[in-house]
Image: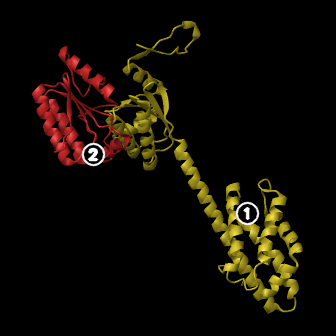
Amino acid sequence: MANVLDVVRRNQESLLQEWLEGIKGGIRRRDLIDDRELKSQAAEVLTMICDAPGEAALDNLNSPPWQPLKDLLASLSTTRAVQGFTPSETAMFILSLKGPIFGLALKLHKNDVDLLFSEITAVDDFIDKLALHTTDSYIHGRDQVIVRQQEEMLELSTPVVTLWDGIVALPLIGTLDSARTQIVMESLLQAIVQTNSRFAIIDITGVPTVDTLVAQHLLKTITAARLMGAECIISGIRPQIAQTIVHLGINLEDVITKAKLSDAFRLALERSGRSVTRNSKSNGPVLSGAREQ
Amino acid sequence: MERIPILRMGNFLLVTIQVDMHDKLALTLQDDLTAKIADVGAKGVLIDISSLEIVDSFIGRTLANIASMARVLDAQTVVVGMQPAVAITLVELGMSLPGIRTALNVESGMEYLKETVIDYRNGEDYDGDSEQD
């Protein structure tokens, strides 16, 4: 086995060239990585293989001498997952190394078929393990991306906006689950305290479906806001959602509901003793502002 | 023995809970407050719980009880300044305290009490649950 590694060490340059040819043949997305970067990555991996200490055995990838190589491949695959490569493209990077090494082994053991077979089996096994490791790291990288995106979505999706002095609105977008409801509830209640708002408008225009669970989450939020002394208005109920709510038998009778956010805002202004008037008719349908009574 | 002070302001009684409520303290408050309402003929009770950070089902129930007892004694109760964490806890415990009026702070709570008591004196038909403002 050491024989093949020796030959690989001696022919590092030519092997690298052949490997790169193989990789380029397999890669369909050259826009994601340029040739120079690919070459430096391949050279690094090959150097790691060649520089492995003499006691490193091909059949035991978990032994300490191979650890630097595994780490390098892991970081390369994680980067590729972020860059948008497919799993097979990532695995092909390392699998393309098989052909050139088999070629070298064939030259070395032309006359001894048994030895050639055992060498090729060992190298094949070794590279397969490396490819599996690459795929594992790739999936791990993907998972990290997904987790990060979920966290970002949670942060992004719960903005509380102040519409007027004492009136806040919470435009909900996306499906409400338990974890999100908790965050939505906390940020709304926090905003009520901070802005000293007596009215909170929850706009569900962006909520695709309302089932019993979502309705229960909404009611919880509304009750908590009421306990703090703020009144909640639900707006943005689409006709289909109104139908669903009635068919499901959800009781929203204790809650003020409005079809549009503007209706809810108007009601909140009225309840807080304000009215909206238009000063000039020529300006078209522009609201000239709310006037304190 | 530890007691929660009850302040009188005209027709109204003011209670500010500044310490952690335990069960006995809540019951003492219930006794003291009902006695005081009957004693001075108060028309409104304002309970400020803005410093209350821990609440359990018993305290929640006691608050609801106090409100109902005050109602029987012809006084409106308003609970003001509930912390977000307390509100979430009560909701998760399944206590929505339907009979209790709430307000954001002492100021809006007093405003509410003054309005309702004046409405009441003007002989208007007043119903505490359906009246929104």
Residue A89 shows which numbered tag? 1
In the rendered image, the vertical position of residue A265 relative to residue B17, given as above or below = above
Along the line of sight, the residue nearer the viewer: A95 or A62: A62
Element assignment for label 1: helix
Residue B72 visible: no
Identity, as a three-letter code, of the amino acid under mark 1: Glu
Please report the residue visible at 30 percent of the width from the left and 44 percent of the height from the top. Answer: B90
Along the line of sight, the residue nearer the viewer: A237 or A56: A56
Reading the image, the residue beneath label 2 is B20
Mark nearer the viewer, 2 or 1:
2
Chain for numbered disc 2:
B
Identity, as a three-letter code, of the amino acid under mark 2: Asp
Element assignment for label 2: loop
Rendering quarter of residue B44: top left
Along the line of sight, the residue nearer the viewer: A55 or A180: A55
Say which colour chain A has.
yellow
- C-alpha gap between disc 2 and disc 1: 62 Å
Residue B8 spot, x, y in % from top left: 19, 27
Say which colour chain B has.
red
* Residues packed near mark 2 inside 10 Å, few (<14), some (14 to 19) or many (20 plus): few
Quadrant location of the N terminus of chain A in the rendered image: bottom right
Rendering quarter of residue A284: top right
Residue A285 spot, x, y in % from top left: 55, 14
